[in-house]
Image: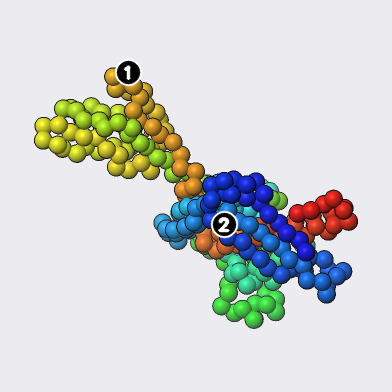
């Protein structure tokens, strides 16, 4: 039987008398002893209840408000989305004919950066395949006739999926296509042509940035602004001008006016309000709320932001379980080892 306790927090909580919940579950940690029932018991500190609010700005952008979770965990999710969530991208380009003014390597580089959508079902099938197995091939064959007097612009929508395997019949509705149809790859003059074959691969952002499913992803602790002493004066307009983002607002009290905090989340920490002296005292306090965190995800379109968030958490759970199993296996023989 294995028991895992958060001993430091236990001591703290005994003093404070905070409530704690204990989760207990059966888990076979050693394959060699399948008949033995082993228990993993975890004590989770529940000082703050976890809250999650999801706001979708557009199809590929979202903002997730999380409350009661450490920024370290949010950062792990962020880094997992950037580096570990797998996507499909063009890996190798075989150029059979290129009579355009662009070099082969420039065309290959541009093609490699085109984000390609693949459904989650197909992604799961292909990610288990051998690394060099080119099951998904995209073809580009454009010929601008010499008698044609205009240039041809080649956009990402002209990329054709060439090779289809058995899985495509199983998931007929799950297509593979460039996320944006209007990405300009190159322009060709009359009499020029390009024939190439692009082999796609599923990989993660750890290997190359083109596999990363996000453009921008960051987290921000929500700012807080506190007025320690009431500010009541005849002329408050000069004070309002100090804050460039409109955090403060004025409330009329007869001839006087009272200043209060309206939108603390707009604070950019410029510290202009702190520099102001009220009878040589600083009465405004600004800081970051460490338990209220906003995670902003801007996907490249290869997958929806909510799907990326879910996949990152699944990956983190898998990694943590693997790590725990290895720790227990390696140290099990040690008599002094206790969890
Ligand atoms: S730090 Fe700057 S942005 Fe924040 S409340 Fe003060 S003046 Fe406004």
Task: Name the residue nearer the viewer: 246 or 195.
Answer: 246
249 horizontally vs 273: left or right: left
Callout 1 crowding tier (Cα within 10 Å): few <14, some 14–19, many ≥20: few
Task: Name the residue nearer the viewer: 29 or 22.
Answer: 22
At a point 44% along the width and 58% down the height, the residue shown is: 53
Residue at the far top in the pictured view: 280
Which numbered disc covers residue 280? 1
Residue 35 showing in the rendered view: yes
Which numbered disc covers residue 254? none
186 horizontally vs 83: left or right: left
Q: Is residue 49 above or below residue 260?
A: below
Task: Name the residue nearer the viewer: 140 or 49.
Answer: 49
Measured as percent of width and height from the top left, residue 141 is found at 63, 64
Q: Is residue 234 above or below residue 150?
A: above
At a point 17% along the width and 33% down the height, the residue shown is: 257
Measured as percent of width and height from the top left, residue 109 is found at 65, 50
At a point 87% along the width and 53% down the height, the residue shown is: 335
Q: Under tag 1, what secondary structure?
A: loop
How many marks overall? 2
Colour mapping used in the image: rainbow
Instruction: Indicate which quadrant contains ligand 1.
Output: top left
Label 2 vs label 1, nearer the camera: 2
2 or 1: tag closer to the N-terminus: 2
Mark 2, residue position = 20
Q: Is residue 259 above or below residue 44?
A: above
Measured as percent of width and height from the top left, residue 188 is found at 56, 54
Mark 1 CB within 8 Å of ligand 1: no
Query: Residue 275's image quarter?
Result: top left
At a point 50% along the width and 53% down the height, the residue shown is: 48
Measured as percent of width and height from the top left, residue 336 is found at 85, 50
Callout 2 crowding tier (Cα within 10 Å): few <14, some 14–19, many ≥20: some
User: CA–CA distance between discs 2 and 1?
Assistant: 45 Å
């Amino acid at each position: 039987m294995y028991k895992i306790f958060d001993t430091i927090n236990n001591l703290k909580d005994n003093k404070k008398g905070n409530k704690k919940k204990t989760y207990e579950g059966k888990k076979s940690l050693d394959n060699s002893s399948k008949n033995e029932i082993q228990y993993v018991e975890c004590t989770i500190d529940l000082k703050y209840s976890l809250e999650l609010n999801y706001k979708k700005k557009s199809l590929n952008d979202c903002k997730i408000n999380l409350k009661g979770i450490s920024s370290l965990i949010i950062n792990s999710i962020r880094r997992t989305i950037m580096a570990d969530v797998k996507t499909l991208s063009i890996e190798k380009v075989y150029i059979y004919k290129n009579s355009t003014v662009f070099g082969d390597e420039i065309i290959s580089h541009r093609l490699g950066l085109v984000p390609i959508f693949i459904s989650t079902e197909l992604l799961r099938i292909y990610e288990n395949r051998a690394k060099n197995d080119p099951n998904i091939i995209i073809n580009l064959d454009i010929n601008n006739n010499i008698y044609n007097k205009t240039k041809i612009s080649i956009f990402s929508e002209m990329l054709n999926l060439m090779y289809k395997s058995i899985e495509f019949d199983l998931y007929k509705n799950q297509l593979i296509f460039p996320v944006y149809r209007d990405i300009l790859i190159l322009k060709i003059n009359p009499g020029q042509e390009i024939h190439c074959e692009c082999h796609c691969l599923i990989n993660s952002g750890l290997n190359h940035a083109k596999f990363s499913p996000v453009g921008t992803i960051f987290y921000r602790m929500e700012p807080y602004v506190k007025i320690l002493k009431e500010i009541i004066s005849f002329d408050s307009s000069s004070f309002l001008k100090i804050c460039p983002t409109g955090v403060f607002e004025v409330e009329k009290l007869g001839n006087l006016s009272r200043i209060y905090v309206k939108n603390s989340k707009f604070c950019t920490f410029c510290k202009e309000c702190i520099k102001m002296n009220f009878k040589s005292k600083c009465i405004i306090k600004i800081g970051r709320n460490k338990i209220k965190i906003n995670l902003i995800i801007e996907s490249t379109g290869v997958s929806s932001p909510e799907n990326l968030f879910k996949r990152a958490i699944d990956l983190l759970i898998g990694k943590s379980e693997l790590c725990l199993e290895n720790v227990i296996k390696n140290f099990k023989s040690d008599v002094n080892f206790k969890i």
